[in-house]
Amino acid sequence: MGTRRGLNRDGTIAREGSLARVPPAFAPVVDAVRARVPRVFGDRLHSAYLYGSIPRGTAVPGVSDLDLLAVLAEEPTGTDRSRAAALGEEIDTAFAQVDGAGVLVSGVGTLLSDLERHDGGFFVACLCTPLLGPDLAERLPPYRPTSLLARETNGDLHTALARWRREARAARTDAERRSLCRRVTRRVVRTGFTLVMPRWGGWTSDLDESAEVFGRYYPARARPMRFAATAARTPRSATDVVEEVLGDLAPWLADEYTAVHGRKQARG
């Protein structure tokens, strides 16, 4: 089915990524993940998904990270999360083409819940590429670029600002600073995009395109958003992030988001 602005012909958001798009340099990484995930989680594993630049086919060796979601039949425990973190470190160490590996872990019940329908559910159905097990997307609805989707995906930016500032002050190593920079700038750019997504009428996960689309509606904020998109691809120091992003753009964005779309439903 053809797509326009990340949409299917019926106006619903098209699922991005596929295993067929994985760049050849990352094929050994994907094969290793496919083999290791079942060993880590055993019969608790329901399914596993790749997301981000690798299944979208835009990953750059030595620059891009690997993003993985492991879905468990039951809600994850502290042990599950520790094992997920260890798996990420193992993959990052074993493969030079990967600059960092993050493993999210969640439960089937959470992802299929009404509360997560337009957040975690959308994430799986539209942004994740099935790697192992039954595809939860078959149990989720189609999605459109609406204000509801914007609110439930990124309407909680305001809750992250103080935490990011603490992490910036606490960062001691280059690796910690790069990790913080990547997380903060990606989140800010994606929040900027979803702020204007309903007006634009489409979907993209490309950071440069996200910043460009945002800038059409908020030209006075276009330069700092472009800076954030650049920093997300080539992480800089935590100090730069604090000064250039957390100092002005992110607080303004949190307030504007609340004014336009409201705040995300509170999680227990």
Image (cartoon, helix red, strand yellow):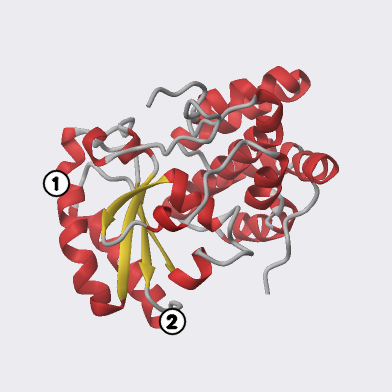
Residue plotted at (26% across, 62% down): 133
Circle 1 crowding by C-alpha within 10 Å: few under 14, some 14–19, many from 20? few
Q: Is 112 on the left-hand or right-hand side of 196? A: left
Q: Element type at marker 2?
A: loop
Residue plotted at (46% across, 44% down): 126
Residue nearer the viewer, 118 or 99: 118
Q: Which mark is residue 67?
A: none
Which of the 4 quarters of the picture holds residue 203?
Answer: top right
Circle 2 crowding by C-alpha within 10 Å: few under 14, some 14–19, many from 20? few
Q: CA distance from mark 2 to mark 1?
A: 29 Å
Q: From what the image shows, is residue 215 above or below residue 101?
A: above
Mark closest to the chain's N terminus, 2 or 1: 1
Residue plotted at (71% across, 48% down): 151
Q: From what the image shows, is residue 189 above or below residue 209?
A: below
Q: Residue furthest right?
A: 259
The residue where tag 1 is placed is 28
Q: From what the image shows, is residue 212 above or below residue 75?
A: above
- The spot of residue 256 in percent (x, y) is 81, 39
The amino acid sitting under disc 1 is Pro
- The spot of residue 147 in percent (x, y) is 72, 40
The residue where tag 2 is placed is 77
The amino acid sitting under disc 2 is Thr
Q: Is 98 on the left-hand or right-hand side of 107? A: left
Task: Report how many numbered discs are placed on residues in the image.
Answer: 2
- The spot of residue 46 in percent (x, y) is 32, 69
- The spot of residue 267 in percent (x, y) is 67, 69
Residue nearer the viewer, 24 or 121: 121
Residue plotted at (51% across, 64% down): 112
